[in-house]
Image (cartoon, grey):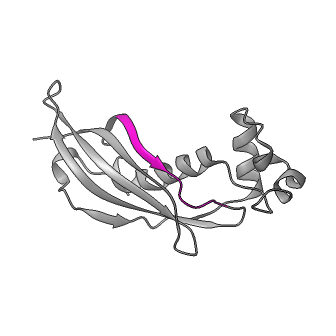
Amino acid sequence: MAGRFFDQWTVGDTMTHDIRRTVTETDNLLFSTMTHNPQPLHIDAEAARASEFGQILVNGTFTFALMVGLTVGDTTLGTLVANLGYDKLVMPHPVFLGDTLRAETEVVALRESRSRPDAGIVTFAHRMRNQRDEVVCECLRMALLKRAAA
């Protein structure tokens, strides 16, 4: 389960990643406390119950990090030089404890590196869906990838 090199990608390549993940209370609580995020909607069951959602919301930065993590094995594992940035990050639906999430990826752009002849830039469109098929997170990720050895 290794990533692909820059020259092995084509614009339009798509994949649904095999690994899915059910989000637990422990995931959300540990991530929120490790990142010093005291938002009551994430860590206070009573405050969350009194909100319009009626339950704890999973920390959005955990959702984003999980989405990227679920895609790494099929996209950049072993071929990444560096992630150059993320763009157009949106979270159109909330994630709740117990939701099972899965990720999809499409290659939307390829560009030769001007400064590194041994690498190129791939722009991935990542999307994550819950068990109800609602999109819960999506973004563009620009990754500098090694070229395959000649």
Q: Quadrant of the C terminus?
A: top left
Q: Residue 52: x percent and y percent?
A: 76, 60
Quadrant in the rendering for residue 85: top left
**Closer to the camera in the image, 41 or 145:** 41
Q: Residue 68: x percent and y percent?
A: 47, 49
Which residue lies at the image location 64% right of the left edge and 60% below the top edge?
95
Q: Residue furthest top?
A: 115
Whether 104 is drawn above or below 125: the answer is below
Whether 7 is drawn above or below 101: the answer is above
Which residue lies at the image location 53% right of the left edge and 69% below the top edge?
134
Whether 52 is drawn above or below 142: the answer is below
Is residue 89 a member of the stretch shown in magenta? yes
The answer to whether any part of residue 77 appears in the image is no
Q: Residue 88: x percent and y percent?
A: 40, 45
Q: Residue furthest right?
A: 46
**Taken as a whole, is the magenta stretch helix, strand or loop?**
strand
Which residue lies at the image location 43% right of the left edge and 54% below the top edge?
71
The answer to whether any part of residue 111 appears in the image is yes
**Closer to the camera in the image, 91 or 72:** 91
Q: Which residues are magenta?
A: 83-95
Marker count (numbered): 0
Quadrant in the rendering for residue 1: bottom left
Is residue 35 a member of the stretch shown in magenta? no
Quadrant in the rendering for residue 125: bottom left
Q: Residue furthest front?
A: 52
Q: Residue 87: x percent and y percent?
A: 39, 41
